[in-house]
Every structure is written in C-alpha cells, then in structure tokens.
Image (spheres, rainbow, N blue to C red):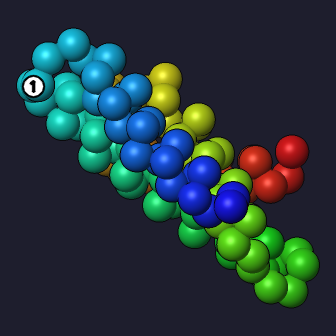
Amino acid sequence: MVFTGASILYIGWFGFNAGSASAANGIAALAFLNTVVATAGAILSWTFAEWVLRGKPSLLGACSGMIAGLVAVTPAAGTVGVGGALIIGLVGGVAGLWG
C-alpha cells in the first residue's frame, strides 16, 4: 500500500516540478531530469544510512527516501545542474532519516 501511494506521488511530482516552467522548454527538461536524479540519490542515501544504522534497509525506508528527495529538490529543480540535484538528493535522504 505504501509503495503504491509513493509511486503515484512520484509520477505526479513530475507535473509539479516540470510543469512549473509553464512551457515545454529546456528548463522543464532540466527540472524533469533533476527530479529523477535527486530522487534516486535520496533513495540510495536513505537505504544506505538505514542499512548502517539498523542493519537492513526496508521498502518503507526507500519510499520515505523517495519522498524526501522529491521534497528536497522541488525549490531548485529548474535551476541547479544535475550534479547539484544529486547532492541535494543525497543530503535530503540522510536528513530525512535523521530528522
């Protein structure tokens, strides 16, 4: 149930981030790509930190990391480069687990 809800949220978030560019242009494409990269980084950092702290990662943790990455990258999705989005995602995933 958590995975299904998180997946629906993930798909909808692309319209939120890329759609804020108000046109199908380079900014929208960058926002779309940054959303994917930051989310992947947050999932990886959350699951790795959970594995180190608790001994095993969980699907709930991966879904929570995904949401943390989406939230973290939203303000900068169309303005930072792909490397910046990865750093935002990595930090957002660990910060979400820590907080």
The picture places residue 68, in percent across and down from the top left corner, at 64, 45
User: Which residue ends up furthest to the front in the rendered image?
Assistant: 1
Q: Quadrant of the N terminus?
A: bottom right
- Camera sees residue 87: no
Residue that label 1 marks: 25
User: Which residue ends up furthest to the left in the rendered image?
Assistant: 25
Q: Quadrant of the C terminus?
A: top right
Identify the residue at horizontal 11%, vertical 25% (top origin): 24
Say which amino acid is labelled 1. Asn
Q: Is residue 9 left or right of residue 98?
A: left
The picture places residue 57, in percent across and down from the top left corner, at 75, 79
Identify the residue at horizontal 40%, vertical 26% (top origin): 16
Q: Is residue 97 left or right of residue 88?
A: right
Label 1 element class: loop
Question: Image quadrant of residue 35?
Answer: top left
Question: Image quadrant of residue 59?
Answer: bottom right
Q: Residues within 10 Å of mark 1 (few under 14, many from 20)?
A: few
Question: Image quadrant of residue 18?
Answer: top left
Identify the residue at horizontal 9%, vertical 25% (top origin): 25
Q: Where 75 sits versus 88, above or below? A: above
Q: Where 20 sits versus 99, above or below? A: above
The picture places residue 42, in percent across and down from the top left corner, at 58, 56
Identify the residue at horizontal 28%, vertical 46% (top origin): 33
User: Which residue ends up furthest to the bottom in the rendered image?
Assistant: 55
Q: Where 47 sits versus 69, above or below? A: below
